[in-house]
Image: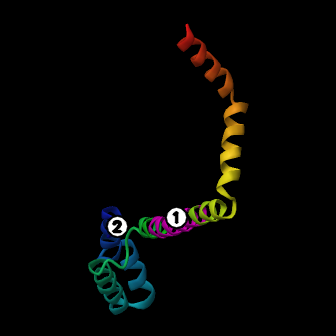
């Protein structure tokens, strides 16, 4: 989509009497200047000129979005596969012992002692 300021500037400069039109007419003749004017008008009509920076930015953002979606799905697939394999490789008894050890290490026995003493009192 052309930028309005660029489209207006191109129209002014390439139209008869415009700065670029007059330069082309002086250098290559009136027909070349008219041909350049028609080409600019055709390009403006087909949106082949305009906000190049915006087009590049939009394309970059779209590609980046597509790539990050692929990375996210690959990353989550890798993590779920890793966890599934980890749980399948280690026996459930080891998980139980590890869980109990973690409970004790984090102070679970003190918590249980406090609960038991409250119930007796």
Find the residue positioned furthest to the left.
45
Up the image or down, 28 lies above or below 105; here it is: below
Up the image or down, 29 lies above or below 70; here it is: below
Residue at position x 30%, y 66% from top?
Answer: 8
Where on the picture, by quarter, is residue 82? bottom right
Badge 2 element: helix
Q: Residues within 10 Å of mark 2 (few under 14, many from 20)?
A: few
Residue at position x 54%, y 62% from top?
Answer: 76
Q: Main secondary structure of the magenta part?
A: helix
Residue closest to the eye, 18 or 67: 67
Residue at position x 40%, y 76% from top?
Answer: 20
Where is residue 6 shown, x and y percent of the image?
Answer: 36, 66
Where on the picture, by quarter, is residue 103? top right
Read off the residue under disc 1. 68
Where is residue 50 shown, x and y percent of the image?
Answer: 37, 71
Read off the residue under disc 2. 9
The C terminus - image quarter: top right
Query: Mark 2 or mark 1: which comes first in sequence?
Result: 2
Q: Is residue 54 left or right of residue 118?
A: left
Residue 31 included in the magenta stretch of the image: no
Per the rendered image, the range of residues in magenta is 61-79
The N terminus - image quarter: bottom left
């Amino acid at each position: 989509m052309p930028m309005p300021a660029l489209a207006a500037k191109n129209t002014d400069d390439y139209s008869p009497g415009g700065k670029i039109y007059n330069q082309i007419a002086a250098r290559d003749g009136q027909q070349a200047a008219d041909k350049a004017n028609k080409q600019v008008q055709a390009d403006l009509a087909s949106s082949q000129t305009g906000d190049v920076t915006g087009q590049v930015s939009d394309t970059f953002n779209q590609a980046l979005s597509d790539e990050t979606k692929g990375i996210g799905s690959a990353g989550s697939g890798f993590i779920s596969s890793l966890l599934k394999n980890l749980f399948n490789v280690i026996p459930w008894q080891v998980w139980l012992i590890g869980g109990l050890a973690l409970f004790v290490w984090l102070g679970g026995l003190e918590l249980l002692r406090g609960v038991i003493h409250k119930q007796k009192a």
